[in-house]
Amino acid sequence: MLGIIGRSGAGKSTLLRMINRLVEPGEGRVLHGATDVTALRGRALRGWRTRCAMIFQQFQLVPRLDGLTNVLLGRLNHRSARIRWRLIGA
C-alpha cells in the first residue's frame, strides 16, 4: 500500500491518472517493474487498468452506498452471472 500526500495543486491526482493512463505523460515513461505502462495498448491496457484499480473520489459512485459496497460493485463485471445475482440480493 502506498500513500501520496501533498498540497492542493501539487499533482497528486495527475500522477494517479498517469499511472492508470487516463492522462498521457508529456514526456518520459511510466514503468511498473519490467512493464512500460506508457506502451500498453488495447487489451493489455484494459488489463492494466483493471489491475491498477483506480477509485474516483467524486464520480461514478452510487451516493446511497458506502465506500466498500461501491468498490465491490466495480468488480461485479469480473464474476459469473450466478454470483452477481446473489451479491445484488435478488
Image (spheres, rainbow, N blue to C red):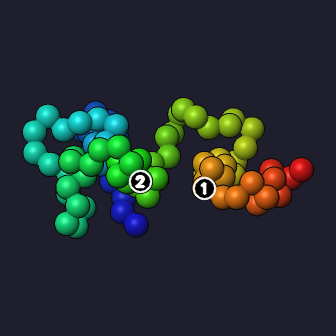
Residue at 60% x, 55% y is: 78
Q: Residues within 10 Å of mark 1 (few under 14, many from 20)?
A: few
Image spot of residue 77 (x, y percent): 63, 50
Q: Secondary structure at mark 2?
A: helix
Q: Quadrant of residue 11?
A: top left
Q: Which mark is residue 47?
A: 2
Image spot of residue 22 (x, y percent): 34, 37
Residue at 74% x, 54% y is: 81
Residue at 70% x, 58% y is: 80
**Residue type, mark 2 in image:** Gly
User: 49 and 8: which one is in front?
Assistant: 49
Compared to 9, does 90 lie above or below? below
Ranked by sequence position, the earlier of labels 1 and 2 is 2
Residue at 29% x, 35% y is: 23
Q: Secondary structure at mark 1?
A: helix
Residue picked out by circle 1: 78
Compared across the picture, whether 33 is left or right of 71 comes to left
Residue 61 visible in the shown view: yes
Q: Are marks 1 and 2 in contact (CB under 8 Å)?
A: no
**Residue type, mark 1 in image:** His
**Residue occupying the far right of the picture:** 90
In the rendered image, the quadrant that contains the N terminus is bottom left
Q: Residues within 10 Å of mark 2 (few under 14, many from 20)?
A: few
Q: Quadrant of residue 35?
A: bottom left
Residue 72 visible in the shown view: no
